[in-house]
Image (spheres, rainbow, N blue to C red):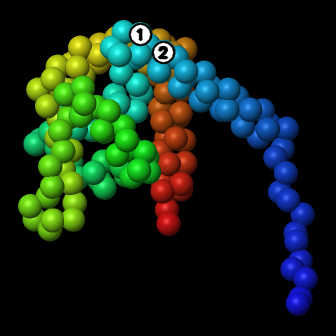
Amino acid sequence: MVAQQVSEPRWLTPAEQKVWRAYLDVSRLLNERMNRQLTEESALSSAEYEILVQLSEHPDRQLRMSELAERVVNSRSRLTHTVARMEQRGLVRRRPCDEDGRGVWCILTDEGMAAIEAAAPGHVAEVRAALFDPLTPAEVEQFGAALIRIREQLRRP
């Protein structure tokens, strides 16, 4: 057996370390704040809200579960459990895909549409206050460009 040569890690610079730690703090604090706002005001989790958003933005208010999982960046099993809870509450319903018999559609119900319409104003106000109000328009543009580039890198196979 030949020993693999391990190269020295590319350690973060002090500036990169500062950014990384700030990112970790912000992502945790932001997720907590968004979850709390949605739960308290709308009885929805962030995951449920995102599912409702994705379905409401589709012209037919329905998506295949596999596509929905990809859009909400969730495992299929976790999505299945979340959608099952939402189905029990009447927010969505599922039905088999007639086209191939393998897939399942997730369909936004009228109750689900009413729930997102009621939740959206408070949620958007919270997002604006937490994420955009502290930034200048130029910073929002730079932040957006950086996030989009990172997202594209992370989504590459």
- Name the kind of residue labelled 2 in the image: Arg
Choose between 71 and 79: the one closer to the eye.
79
Which residue is at the far front?
Answer: 88
Using the image, determine if residue 145 lies above or below residue 110: below
The residue identified by callout 1 is: 40
Q: Secondary structure at mark 1?
A: helix
- Name the kind of residue labelled 1 in the image: Glu
Q: Position of residue 53 (x, y in %)?
A: 28, 32
Q: Are marks 1 and 2 in contact (CB under 8 Å)?
A: yes
Q: Residue at x 40, y 25 (%)?
A: 45
Q: Residue at x 11, y 26 (%)?
A: 110
Pointer 1 local density, CA inside 10 Å: few below 14, some 14–19, many at least 20: few
Q: Residue at x 15, y 23 (%)?
A: 111
Q: Position of residue 42 (x, y in %)?
A: 33, 14
Pointer 2 local density, CA inside 10 Å: few below 14, some 14–19, many at least 20: some
Q: Is residue 17 left or right of residue 26?
A: right
Can residue 93 be spotted in the picture?
yes
